[in-house]
Image (cartoon, helix red, strand yellow):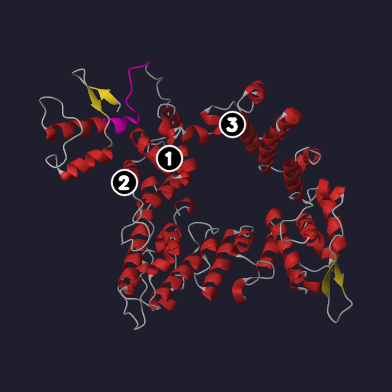
Amino acid sequence: MSGAPTGDGTTTPEITWEELVTTALLGTDRRAPAHVPPGRTAPAALLDAAAVATVRRRAGLRPARAARRPERAPADPRPPLPAPAARRLAALLADRSGGPGGGRRGSSPDLMELLPQWLAVANTHGYAAPPQALPALLDAARGRTDLRPAALAFAGPRALWLARLNPDWRFALRAAPGGGASLPDAEDAEAVRRLWREGLFAERAALLGALRARTPAVGRELLVSTWPTERAEDRLMFLDTLRTGLSDADEPFLEQALGDRSRNVRATAAELLSALPGSALAARMAVRATVCVALDRTGNAPAIAVEAPPECDPGMERDGVTATPPTGRGERSWWLGQLVEAAPLGTWPERLGGRTAEEIVALPVADGWQGELHAAWCRAAVRQRDAAWSRALLGAPSAPEAGGPGAVSLAERAKLLAALEPDERAAWVAGFIATHGLSEAFQLLGVCAVPWAPPLGQAVVDALNIARDAGSYPWSFSGVMGLAERCLDPAEAVRLEALLAVPDEPEDAAPGAGGYWAEAFQRLVTTLRMRAAMTRELNPQTPPAEPRETATRPPETAAQPPETAPQPPEAAG
């Protein structure tokens, strides 16, 4: 067992903090410390070991043999956290348990679930992390990959400095652009070219991504300069960075990539080109798709007639159509779906009698092709981020099963919703919940802007209240309740106080369900108030918002939106 040198020339064995805590709880009479130096009692030896372990934890560096002193940590020029916010961060980082898993959670907020929101607001203000918080912050990010981007942005350059000293934090170097290396200024053309020619893959990928975010043309030209000599797997990764800043100016290069020797590179190039409605590939796909889909006026009412392509010719393959279908799919329907998915949605109004998207998806489709055709239009609407088509394919949220004309799964509905403006998205999901309840709403809630707009927040609270009145356990809705704690507008806390009392339980209710619901709503209210306090602490210049009036009406009428006070910034949700 390795250890740290002491003043008398001996070595203190390295003991984990958990072992020290266990020994302290049991008592040194029942469990002696692992190492008791001569002349020291067991209690004193335990305190000595705890003091050494505390220094190690604060230092963020494992004990080792004496070596060359590391370079000084880089300066962080960002403004320091306000003192209340620094204390809040320490409390959030100290709660590493994440609360009990499953079952009854009690009424205490889950502090670790609030840490991502705290980091988002702190990064919005551009604060620097307190140096003493960096070890705990890196430990938290080590255990939760979803925390890493925000945690490393907040931790700043000193986190990378620490990561080079502690193997436990090496993930920070892997997650940082270019493995933590500093990227040259985009204006320094010679430094950019040198790093692109001589850098490691991670450094080159980070450089290309940074250039595409700021100067897309420069990034593309850099990639073109070495494209023929890149490895196939690197070409694929580099090509994927063109999604950032994608424009018609990228079309000539992407057309060239359609002839690449790698099938995956060709497919990615075709996908990017089909996202450009004005590209030559999109025009070629439109011609092929309109041959297959037409308006049939021979019946009593107009309908859509479909004739799937009889073959997948070399031109289709070059433009990204995969010839071999997955197991269980017919070849012709597989080819049809790919053609329609890649064709510009603006093709169809002219092809189908000048109708709008909503009118087109309402037309009957002959011979059982409706599911295949509408599914392809869904994928096209998502790829082209077309709000009109997304709206038409979603249909009304109150429709039976809320399937819509083209959405047949929650995942597809969530993708279509992402193309709508935040307010419209929230209104659609609120209507879905009002009609269908919360059992299928979790995935849809995940695409809504935070904090939730008042109609959506009210719909969620009303649905939870209905579930409580039905006498079921709140654990069935733990996922939605957890989302509500993170996403409800904190100004809703006062209105929710009416739900804190233990309700009268119906005869067929689950035993004790009312008490569990009261705990769940108490946790929700406490969490919302804590989020509001977090926002004030990080933005001390902002006066606290006026609370909303306490609801005194029954839950069904209390859901009407009261006059709202100013809401906290969106990042606080």
Query: Quarter-wise, where is residue 506 in the image?
Result: bottom left
Residue 194 x, y percent position in the rendering = 65, 21
Instruction: Check disc 3 and report the residue beneath it.
Output: 202
Contact between labelled residues 1 and 2, with CB atoms less than 8 Å apart: no
Local SS, label 2: helix
Does the stretch in magenta take in 304? no
Q: Specify whether 285 is left or right of 464.
A: right
The residue labelled by disc 2 is: 91
Is 137 left, or right, of 400 in this rendering? left
Quadrant hosting residue 479: bottom left
Residue at 39 percent of width and 58 percent of height: 545
Q: Position of residue 551 (x, y in %)?
A: 37, 73
Q: Nearer the observer, disc 3 or disc 2?
A: 3
Looking at the image, which is closer to me, 326 or 537? 326
Say above or below: 94 vs 306: above
Query: Between 237 and 461, which is closer to the camera in this rendering?
Result: 237
| Residue 53 % position (x, y) | 26, 32
Any magenta on residue 55? yes
Pointer 2 local density, CA inside 10 Å: few below 14, some 14–19, many at least 20? some
**Amino acid type assigned to the residue bearing label 3 in the image:** Ala
Q: Select label 2 or label 1 by which is in front.
A: 1
Measure the alpha-carbon separation of dots 1 and 3.
20 Å
The span shown in magenta is 54-68
| Residue 520, quarter of the rendered image | bottom left
Q: Quadrant of the C terminus?
A: bottom left
Disc 1 target residue: 142
